[in-house]
Amino acid sequence: DQQVKQNSPSLSVQEGRISILNCDYTNSMFDYFLWYKKYPAEGPTFLISISSIKDKNEDGRFTVFLNKSAKHLSLHIVPSQPGDSAVYFCAASRNAGKSTFGDGTTLTVKP
Amino acid sequence: ETGVTQSPTHLIKTRGQQVTLRCSSQSGHNTVSWYQQALGQGPQFIFQYYREEENGRGNFPPRFSGLQFPNYSSELNVNALELDDSALYLCASSSREQTEAFFGQGTRLTVV
């Protein structure tokens, strides 16, 4: 049973527009939710996180929203840039380092 | 500040052999986690080491084992390799005060 799901394997957006990546989870015991970005031949890089006691966290162009009742979180990137093209992983954690990952969404931002 | 480094970057082994992968954690981090990432999937948690002790394990058989050393570097050992063990193996270091982990570039293991 996959506890963290990213139902969209890929997403394509135009430069300057908003990118919205979605993630669903099943375990209500998770304390933190994280987004990582991965380029080919590199390890995942931490992007932004949110505690389960919050519903929104912003960092520059990146905002993560958490809807606990729906067990759903989303990552908004605005405006999207070509350099944002990468695989984005949603992860849920009860402990730093012990994370359960989704299978990723490949974001392509077209110039 | 030194990042997380893994060695080797690529490795080819024969089914039934044993392999050791190495990881140097980021300066100041005392926790190392290992993940297996199969093609087209997200990283799967193997186990975590905190101050040289195993601190949690995912759904992996005992032939996956590890060590953490006093300098917090770590090894992942896999015995009796199977074809399905072919994957990218990621090491991540973290500290107790952080929610996020910092990943190395991974070791690509191919079992033939």
Image (cartoon, coloured by chain):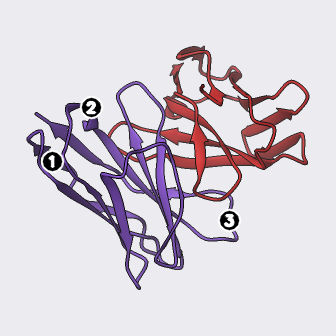
Chain colours: A red, B purple
- Between the residue at mark 1 and the residue at mark 2, the CA separation in whole angstroms equals 15 Å
Q: Residue furthest bottom?
A: B70
- Label whose residue precedes the other's in the sequence (3 or 1): 1
Q: Which residue is mark 1?
A: B11
Whether marks 3 and 1 lie on the same chain: yes
Left or right: B35 in relation to A94: left
Which of the labelled discs sits on residue B98, or is there none?
3
Left or right: A100 in relation to B46: right
Q: Which residue is mark 2?
A: B84
Whether marks 2 and 3 lie on the same chain: yes
Q: What chain does badge 1 belong to? A: B
Does A69 sit above or below residue A91?
above
- Between the residue at mark 2 and the residue at mark 3, the CA separation in whole angstroms equals 33 Å
**In front: B38, or A34?**
B38
- Label whose residue precedes the other's in the sequence (2 or 3): 2
Report x, y in % for residue B30.
53, 76
Corner quadrant of residue A77:
top right
Q: What chain does badge 2 belong to? A: B
Q: Residue at x 65, y 31 (%)?
A: A3
Q: Nearer the viewer, mark 2 or mark 3?
A: 2
Report x, y in % for residue A23.
69, 26
